[in-house]
Amino acid sequence: SQQGEEDPQALSIQEGENATMNCSYKTSINNLQWYRQNSGRGLVHLILIRSNEREKHSGRLRVTLDTSKKSSSLLITASRAADTASYFCATARYGNNRLAFGKGNQVVVIP
Amino acid sequence: GAVVSQHPSRVICKSGTSVKIECRSLDFQATTMFWYRQFPKQSLMLMATSNEGSKATYEQGVEKDKFLINHASLTLSTLTVTSAHPEDSSFYICSAIDISTDTQYFGPGTRLTVL
């Protein structure tokens, strides 16, 4: 069953604006990972946050994790046209490296 | 970051033939690899877990005799789609776990079209 479930929204923003996506899941997790996928391509790993972490930064990316609400958010600051892609969250449970993917969020950054 | 390659990137075949897709971890050893399938505008669906030196573990609903998986070394897993049919046309993506970081790295995918 799908563990990660992003809010089912397509996001269209102007270059320079921030983009925020959310992800919710149902069971206990070991970690949560965010991936980006450009059309027709493979997935690019963006960031991993462990269950004992609350916030993590990587460049223009900021991920938060709220295990009490079983949710995560991905913030892309100062967006660029090259950030146009689909973004997926995926959760991994303890003792099991299988990832459960959410539906994905389509982000379009308008130059 | 770690790199995972897939070959071929695209393949077109006739119905009834078999197609082999390779997945390699290029700069780390992977005892576990995964095979996913993705339909247009949809998320990834896990097909099977490939374990080095042992049998693959298939997800419910995935035919193991149709999707043969072999994980013969710590850097290579292969997926063979046997007797392919048009409904097998899809984007197949593999991934490998770098156990030193718990991170799963994905290959670039293989677009399979069965005529």
Image (cartoon, coloured by chain):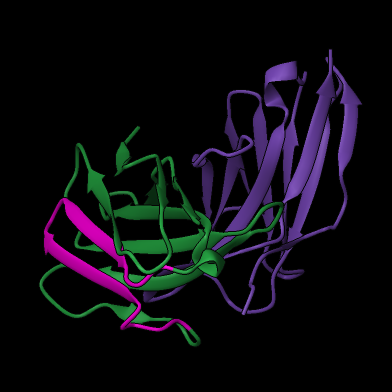
Q: Residue furthest top?
A: A111
Q: Which chain corresponds to the colour purple?
A: A
The image quadrant that residue A46 belongs to is: top right
The front one of B43 and A79 is B43
Residue A79 lies left or right of residue B62; in this view the side is: right
The vertical placement of B59 against A50, above or below, is below
Question: Is A91 left or right of B26, judged from the image as shown?
Answer: right
Q: Position of residue B82 (x, y in %)?
A: 32, 71
Across and down, in percent, residue A45 comes to: 49, 41
Could you say where residue B54 lies in the image, as x and y percent from the top left?
14, 78
Q: Is residue A44 visible?
A: yes
User: Image quadrant for the N terminus of chain A?
Assistant: bottom right
Could you tell me which residue is drawn at 56 percent across and 68 percent down?
B87
Q: Is residue A94 magenta?
A: no
Q: Disc count in the image? A: 0
Residue B108 in picture, x, y percent from top left? 43, 40
Side of B30 where B53 appears, left or right: left
Which residue shows up at 25% across the image and 51% down it?
Answer: B22
Q: Residue at x 19, y 62 (%)?
A: B31
* Colour chosen for chain B: green
Q: Would you say residue A51 is visible in this rendering? A: no
The residue nearer to you, when weighing A68 against A109, is A109
Residue B83 within the segment the image draws in magenta? yes
Quadrant assignment for the C terminus of chain A: top right
Which residues are the magenta region?
A: B62-84
From the viewer's perspective, is residue B91 above or below residue B80? above
Query: Which residue corresponds to the image point at 38% horizontal and 73% vertical from the top-left?
Result: B48
